[in-house]
């Protein structure tokens, strides 16, 4: 799949000065929500007392042997397939390094034969971002630095908790196809939606079950890639966007001053809004990878892969497309409903004959993400139909909807109980006349084309009707009066 | 045939493994490692065109275990093995540099 780098064709504007362009590639670590760790039966649990979920395997004690967790392997392959990857026969490898977050002095990961390769993910606007690989590895323990104000280089000593060591991870390595911080944000949001849809992780950036590292460089359009820096410590989508923007501008400033960008890892500081050097990478990392002799290869059968494919529900991109088609909007416009899990409700209501535009308005503005479950699609469609037929104003419909969510009631009964009836046009017209008479100064401005004063008249009518009037109808009447 | 491994290679590998070797030791291990690699060359001389590459000496794959929790160790017992602990955690010397 080499046709994924479509971003260059329509490189969106990152808002950088002097014709500079950003090139971004993201590495996302996602903790799998299995019951146990990747290679042992210790609980995979966030928030336990330190060092209570440990055993000889995840502590790297001599003589212990890892055995791969069936669910972790299945989840990793499901994620790979959801990202349109090819699932290959794969091999675990030892990544050797010295740091106390791994008691074995190596991390079991994958190297030259990862489980998933060459996939893609589609942003709401249809741009495909390439996925290079999505491999399985174990998480590291948690180190905290004591003394020296918590700063690593001045630490008095470090404390290590191995509860997280051995928790299963998938590292999703994206291609350098992203061109703006906003695209990067969309990519992570989309990845998260997919991960949640296929139920392999809770993907919480704030708890670290989804962690994003960003590689960013700058170049002038059509020039080769510049030297990149890797940014770590991105704990929210907001941090990601801010850090990328800061880092690109830092690199541009260096280059425009005739200096060069040094390839290095940088740490995002949310408080001061800057990235700081962690270490230089003048020398390439050398982890002395070799095949893990204690584990045998993974080689899923066609049946296994078919079962994994069958377990994948309709993904966000297809759900956006389905709703867009039904509602007559673009997939971008359908994105919010899908993101909030309200698309099935909207589709059912539209199918039941409700006006698509009104359905989309309610779904976007008048319903919260968790409210779809308490709403019967037929009742929702009924409400929209009452609104479009003029039985209810937009304001009344909104109030009835809120009560439907609250009580699960039927719209006709709720409207009747509240005494909602469509206001006669004649009654509304006289109220509008009253409002005009009450403020001749504003009326003169309105007639002169000043739309800002519209609110004063609508407000008058709303007050007089206790909010039951249709604001749009009022505005329309005002326009007609002004036109003479 | 060229030398299978140089003295610089050995110094580099020793550095990666955090081993501090004297000049004499470097010479000594370069010679020893060269002998091991020479032996590997004997194997390279075999015609293996018809043999599929393998990552493991056993012809096994997909050995997994069910995702079922098993008891973890007692923390006091675990920490009892460590030279220094604090607040239920392993206490280690200040860490220089960063995790990869």
Image (spheres, rainbow, N blue to C red):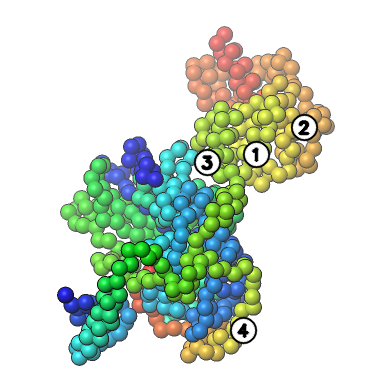
Image quarter in which the C terminus of chain A is found: top right
Q: CA distance from mark 4 to mark 2?
A: 59 Å
Q: Give the percent coordinates (x, y) of residue A196.
A: 57, 52
**CB-based contact (under 8 Å), mark 4 and mark 2:** no
Instruction: Report which residue position mark 3 lands on.
Output: A317
Q: CA–CA distance between discs 4 and 1? A: 48 Å
For label 4, the crowd category at 10 Å Cα-Cα, with few meaning under 14, some 14 to 19 and many 20 or more, is: some
Q: Secondary structure at mark 3?
A: helix
Q: Residue at x 38, y 74 (%)?
A: A96
Q: Which residue is mark 4?
A: B74
Badge 1: how crowded within 10 Å, few (<14), some, or many (20+)?
A: some
Upstream in the sequence, badge 3 or badge 1? 3
Q: Which mark, residue A344? A: 1
Furthest residue in direction top, as rendered: A484
**CA separation in Å, label 2 and label 1:** 20 Å
Mark 2 Cα shell of 10 Å, populated few (<14), some (14-19), many (≥20): many
Distance from label 3 to label 4 (Cα)? Answer: 47 Å
């Amino acid at each position: 799949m080499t046709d994924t780098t479509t971003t260059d064709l329509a490189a969106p504007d990152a808002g950088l000065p002097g014709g500079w362009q950003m090139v971004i590639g993201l590495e996302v670590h996602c903790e799998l929500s299995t019951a146990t760790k990747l290679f042992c039966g210790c609980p995979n649990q966030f928030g336990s007392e330190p060092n209570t979920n440990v055993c000889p395997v995840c502590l790297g004690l001599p003589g212990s042997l890892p055995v791969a967790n069936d669910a972790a392997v299945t989840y990793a392959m499901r994620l790979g397939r959801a990202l349109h990857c090819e699932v290959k026969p794969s091999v675990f490898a030892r990544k050797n390094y010295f740091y106390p977050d791994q008691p074995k002095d190596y991390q079991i990961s994958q190297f030259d034969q990862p489980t998933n390769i060459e996939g893609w993910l589609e942003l709401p606007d249809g741009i495909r971002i390439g996925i290079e690989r999505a491999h399985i590895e174990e998480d590291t323990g948690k180190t905290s630095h004591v003394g020296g104000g918590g700063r690593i280089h001045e630490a008095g000593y470090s404390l290590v908790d191995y509860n997280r060591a051995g928790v299963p991870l998938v590292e999703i390595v994206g291609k350098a196809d992203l061109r703006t911080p906003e695209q990067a944000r969309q990519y992570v949001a989309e990845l998260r939606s997919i991960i949640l849809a296929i139920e392999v992780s809770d993907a919480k950036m704030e708890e670290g079950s989804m962690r994003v590292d960003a590689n960013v460089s700058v170049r002038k359009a059509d020039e080769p890639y510049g030297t990149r820096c890797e940014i770590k410590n991105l704990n929210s989508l907001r941090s990601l966007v801010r850090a990328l923007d800061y880092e690109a501008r830092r690199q541009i400033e260096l280059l425009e001053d005739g200096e060069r960008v040094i390839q290095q890892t940088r740490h995002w500081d949310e408080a001061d809004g800057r990235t700081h050097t962690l270490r230089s990478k003048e020398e390439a990392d050398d982890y002395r990878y070799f095949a893990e002799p204690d584990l045998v290869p993974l080689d899923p059968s066609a049946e296994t892969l078919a079962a994994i494919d069958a377990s994948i529900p309709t993904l966000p991109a297809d759900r956006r497309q389905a709703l867009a088609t039904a509602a007559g909007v673009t997939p971008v416009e359908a994105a919010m409903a899908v993101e909030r899990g309200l698309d099935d409700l909207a589709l059912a209501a539209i199918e039941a004959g409700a006006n698509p535009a009104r359905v989309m308005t309610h779904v976007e503005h008048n319903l919260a993400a968790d409210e779809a479950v308490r709403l019967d699609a037929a009742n929702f469609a009924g409400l929209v139909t009452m609104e479009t037929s003029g039985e209810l104003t937009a304001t009344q419909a909104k109030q009835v909807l809120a009560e439907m969510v609250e009580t699960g009631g039927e719209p006709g009964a709720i409207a009747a109980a509240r005494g909602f009836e469509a206001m006669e046009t004649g009654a509304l017209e006289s109220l509008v006349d009253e409002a005009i008479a009450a403020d001749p100064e504003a009326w003169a401005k309105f007639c002169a084309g000043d739309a800002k004063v519209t609110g004063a008249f609508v407000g008058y009518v709303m007050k007089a009707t206790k909010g039951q009037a249709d604001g749009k109808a009022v505005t329309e009447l005002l326009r007609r009066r002004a036109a003479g | 045939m060229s030398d299978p491994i140089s003295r610089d290679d050995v110094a580099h590998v020793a550095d990666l493994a955090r081993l501090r070797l004297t000049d004499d030791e470097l010479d000594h291990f370069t010679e020893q490692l060269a002998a091991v690699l020479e032996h590997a060359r004997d194997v390279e001389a075999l015609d293996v065109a018809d043999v599929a590459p393998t990552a493991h000496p056993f012809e096994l794959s997909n050995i997994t275990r069910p995702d079922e929790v098993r008891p973890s160790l007692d923390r006091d017992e675990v920490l009892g093995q460590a030279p220094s602990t604090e607040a239920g955690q392993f206490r280690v010397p200040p860490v220089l540099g960063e995790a990869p």
